[in-house]
Image (cartoon, rainbow, N blue to C red):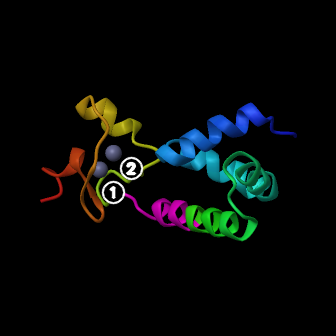
Amino acid sequence: MVITRSAWISIYGDFMKKKNLQLIAQFLDKHPDDFGRFLEEENGIAADESDFIIKEFMEMVDGMEDRACRVCGCTDHDCSQCVEKTGEPCHWVEEDLCSACVDEGE
Ligand SMILES: [Zn+2]
Ligand SMILES: [Zn+2]
């Protein structure tokens, strides 16, 4: 699969806004060199710097994956149950407790 320049631009936009992290991580995992090249061509970011940026990003996503609510088990990537329950996405109240469950967790 070849990722077009315009696709990389939208991926990079999400990357900067820290949106769709899981999806971006999948792209970067499969095409780290392509993204590095894109960063260099579009933004003048040197290869060793982009390696670092990608590594940092992947570590951040990895760290987030571990985070789940101790009551409902929701994560940053899958909060649909909280949206159903409260009508809005939750946020973290404690390290492992989301705002949708804060009353039940006590
Ligand atoms: Zn929860
Ligand atoms: Zn949630």
Q: Which mark is residue 40?
A: none
Q: Which quadrant would residue 57 be assigned to in this image?
A: bottom right
Looking at the picture, how far across and down is residue 41, in whole percent?
76, 49
What kind of secondary structure does the magenta stretch mostly adopt?
helix
Q: Of 13 and 104, which appears nearest the observer? A: 13
Q: Which residue is mark 2?
A: 74
The residue type indicated by label 2 comes to: Cys
Tell me where the magenta segment starts and ends, as one range. 59-68
Along the polypeptide, which appears first: circle 2 or circle 1? Answer: 1
Magenta region includes residue 66: yes
Q: Of 76 and 49, which appears nearest the observer? A: 49
Lateral position of residue 53 relative to residue 83, left or right: right
Q: Residue furthest right?
A: 1
Query: Tag count in the figure?
Result: 2
Q: Which mark is residue 69?
A: 1
Q: Is residue 74 above or below residue 10?
A: below
Looking at the picture, how far across and down is residue 34, in whole percent?
80, 52
CB of mark 2 within 8 Å of CB of mark 1?
A: yes
How far is the residue under mark 2 from the one under mark 1?
5 Å
Looking at the picture, how far across and down is residue 70, in whole percent?
31, 61
Q: Is residue 4 above or below residue 36?
A: above
Residue at horizontal 68%, vertical 51%?
Answer: 26
The residue type indicated by label 1 comes to: Cys
Element marked by disc 2: loop
The verdict on label 1 being within 8 Å of ligand 1 is yes
Element marked by disc 1: loop
The verdict on label 2 being within 8 Å of ligand 2 is yes
Lateral position of residue 52 relative to residue 65, left or right: right
Residue at horizontal 42%, vertical 52%?
Answer: 75
